[in-house]
Amino acid sequence: MKLLLKPIVDTDSPLEGEGLVIEKPVSFLGDVDPEMGILVQPDSRMNGEPLSRRVLFAPEGRGSTVGSYVLYALKSNGKHPLAIVMHKAEPIVITGAVISGIPLLEGMPWNFYNEPRILSKVVVNPGGWVEIIE
Amino acid sequence: MYLTKQEEAALTGEYGEAVRIAFEVIVKVGEALGAEKLIPINHAHISGISYNNIRDPGLRFIREIREKGGKFKVPTTINPIGLDLDDPSGIPGVTPEFIEKQKEIIDNLTAMGGKPVMTCTPYYADEIQPGWHLAWGESSAVGYANTYIGAWTNREGGPLALMAAISGETYYSGVHIPENRYPRTLFEVNYYENDQALSSILGEIIAKQTRVKQPLLKGINHIREPEVKSMCAAAGAAGNIEMCIIPGITKVPVDKDIIEEEIPVEKADIIRELERYEPTSRPDIVFLGCPHASIEELVDLARIAGEHPGRAVNNFWVAVSRTVYNKALSMGVIDLLKKKNIRVMRDTCIVVSPGWRETKATVATNSYKTMFYMKRIHGLDSYLAPINKLVSLSFR
């Protein structure tokens, strides 16, 4: 699958890694451990999955406004996702992505997030082209 | 995005490096959200202040902005920190190193012009006028400002609020635009009683079901200020709601509504949630004041506690801002509560304070937000109940 999404924070060069798809909106404060770089969503099947070297797919952001700093801390700790792909990005995630330079794209259809799963290969290209191999 | 000559100059660094960074971040975020211009703000409130939440990377970020010449252009308040600066006792993870780092964060923010009142209720510390444009972090305060005060603010990430304090401007998008404040989801609330635990459950239900913003809430016209505050806090924690529209309270022309969906909220929906979270035995800690309690809430708590012959035999805490603490002290309310073994904490809240995970303590509260984050961030068993229930479980 190849899609053109809207790059909010674009990447300079292609990024490649596994994809981590979560079904619920993400609050980086609370849902992510910035030191271990893992997902903490106890009611999700993806609970405990690492974000590092993966493209994180989450439908949208929610919750605490401290989330921007958690993204920044993930980057500082070297535990950040390669990129974040959302249905719709909101100010907290955008701010976090801008100050930490983590590529952020939006425009992924809602139903993509119905099933939490690991994608075997994702390539995020400059300009918003995303290739996904399930 | 359209930028004035001054804004262009700021972006090129004419007013210094901190101002340049501030504008750069705001313009980037604004462009991502399709903003056509920037607008001046009257006030900023900065979240992301607790060392427990932002750790060394956040501290470094704030320090660097200050070192690059950051100065706040508008009145700016700051969120709660990880301890009560006058009495750090009782919080397990407060070490000398933690205090030092926490103080460094505060010192950097106050050096830039932040008001040293660490609270999630900036509206009790500074007078906020209806119609003001704000750049506020702290989701509960954002909900309160839009819903109750009639001021205008998006839910800003902590660093963006910091940048807006420096630039004195924010991007013109979201609920700064009148049309985006019109309701699009209608909730027919068929059961409501004034109680903060109950209104926070209502906030949770609204947040989890709102697909198109903003929610219009019918059937709760008799809601009071403390309950609006709790509801907005819950809605901000459980979802990404920046405002609710309550007829008679929220200044939005409801006749211009463009309702896309209607959702009933029944008594059973609310009772089910309340029962699900209810404590059945005495919790190790009762925590009230999320968001920070007002003077009226403290007086009310003193009255409820006074009606019980006993006193708390667990850690029974209520958090407030310094502004409210000083007022309560002069009114004798702090002493009244102390006699019931209720501790009034300043500057902090249990959610942003450190070291809880290892304690395995049980926590009960009248705030969905506290319950949610004590589970999520600290991994503690957390419960929700009205104050009189918490008193009867805790007093002997």
Image (cartoon, helix red, strand yellow):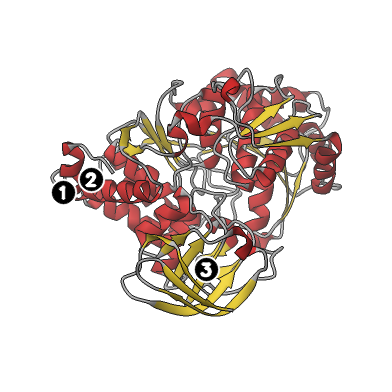
The mark found on residue B13 in the picture is 1
Question: From what the image shows, is residue B294 above or below residue B44?
Answer: above
**Residues under labels 1 and 3: Cα distance?**
34 Å
Label 3 environment density (alpha carbons within 10 Å; few <14, some 14–19, many ≥20): many
Residue on which the image places disc 2 = B19
Report if the CB atoms under discs 2 and 1 are less than 8 Å apart. Answer: yes
Question: At 57% across and 60% down in the image, what residue appears?
Answer: A109
- Foreground residue among A17 and B375: A17
Q: Chain of mark 1?
A: B
Residue B215 in view (yes/no): yes
Residue B366 in view (yes/no): no
Q: Amino acid at mark 2?
A: Val
- Foreground residue among A113 and B386: A113
Q: Quadrant of the C terminus of chain B?
A: top right
Question: From what the image shows, is residue A109 above or below residue B300?
Answer: below
- Foreground residue among B98 and B209: B209
Q: Amino acid at mark 1?
A: Gly
Question: From what the image shows, is residue B376 above or below residue B174?
Answer: below
Q: Nearer the viewer, mark 3 or mark 2?
A: 3
The mark found on residue A56 in the picture is 3
Number of disc labels: 3
Mark 3: which secondary structure? strand
Question: At 53% across and 22% down in the image, what residue appears?
Answer: B327
Left or right placement of residue B42 versus residue B256 in this view: left
The mark found on residue B113 in the picture is none
Q: Nearer the viewer, mark 1 or mark 3?
A: 3
Mark 2: which secondary structure? helix
- Foreground residue among A26 and A79: A26
- Whether labels 3 and 2 share one chain: no
Query: Mark 2 or mark 1: which comes first in sequence?
Result: 1
Rendering coords of residue B269 (x, y %): 82, 40
